Image: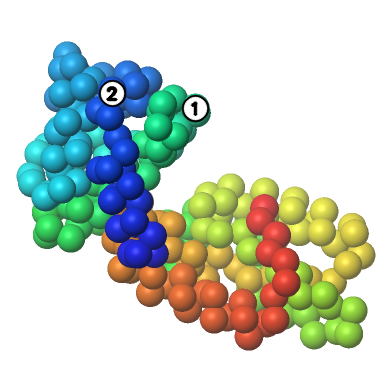
Amino acid sequence: LRDIYNKAKENILDTCIGCGKCIRVCPVISGTELQGQSAGAIQKKVLNFLRAPFHDQALYNKAFACIACFKCSDNICPENLNPVVINELIKWGHHQAGFDVPSYHEPTAPKSRQRILSSLQTDYREYCRISEEEICETEAHEGVVFFPGCNVYYQPDKILAARDVLEKTGKPYSFLPGLDNCCGNIHMLTGDVEGAERVYAKFVDKLRQLKTKKIICW
């Protein structure tokens, strides 16, 4: 993952022409100290940060307030770069430089928000159905794994509905709850790329052990 990000950063620094088109469509900019500055000037500051991270509250707000609406990546860049990745690189740069970054809550923790909120919205039987691992070992099993991730646990009815749909097919599958398995996305949101590598490697190892051929998301 770090190799991918470093290559992405090199490509952005080599390719970006600093036109600022991605800045102009960003709905977050108007709520930060960057409002009123020219898009080109903002992009120049972004590129300087990628070369050598420096503390700048406006860039911090630009990256960490990103709502992942993907307007900036919808065929906006004339060089076909992905501005969402630029925000991720800014967050990683803050993390690497030791600047203050938002804290995150491990969804796998015993008292994570996901566990608490999903338990409040379900009865005991339903909660067990979305939180307990179920490994299918029948001969008909074809390496299919349902992994809902952690975010949907704020709305557990969607996981329950997805399981109902899967069971209507009559085909066996294994269920890996998102509360005990982490893909690393929650770490990425705060620029903790190293933490993301740690948890997703563990998850991938588990998928290998199950001889997974297909992953189904909710």
How crowded pointer 2 is (Cα within 10 Å; few <14, some 14-19, many 20+) is rated as: some
Q: Nearer the viewer, residue 12 or 201?
A: 12
Q: Quadrant of the N terminus?
A: bottom left
Q: Residue lying furthest top in this view?
A: 36
Quarter residue 104 falls in: bottom left
Q: Residue at x 60, y 68 (%)?
A: 177
| SS of the residue under disc 1 | loop
Going by the numbered disc 1, the residue's amino acid type is Asn
In this picture, is 177 found above or below 168?
A: below
| SS of the residue under disc 2 | loop
Going by the numbered disc 2, the residue's amino acid type is Gly
Q: Nearer the viewer, residue 96 or 169?
A: 96
In this picture, is 57 found above or below 28?
A: below
In this picture, is 135 found above or below 83?
A: below
| Residue 185 in the image, given as x and y percentages of width and height | 43, 57
For label 1, the residue is: 75
| Residue 170 in the image, given as x and y percentages of width and height | 92, 65
For label 2, the residue is: 20
Task: Give the side of residue 152 with respect to residue 170, left or right.
Answer: left
- Residues under labels 2 and 1: Cα distance? 13 Å
Residue 111 in sight: no
Task: Give the side of residue 26 with respect to residue 209, left or right.
Answer: left
Q: Residue at x 55, y 54 (%)?
A: 153
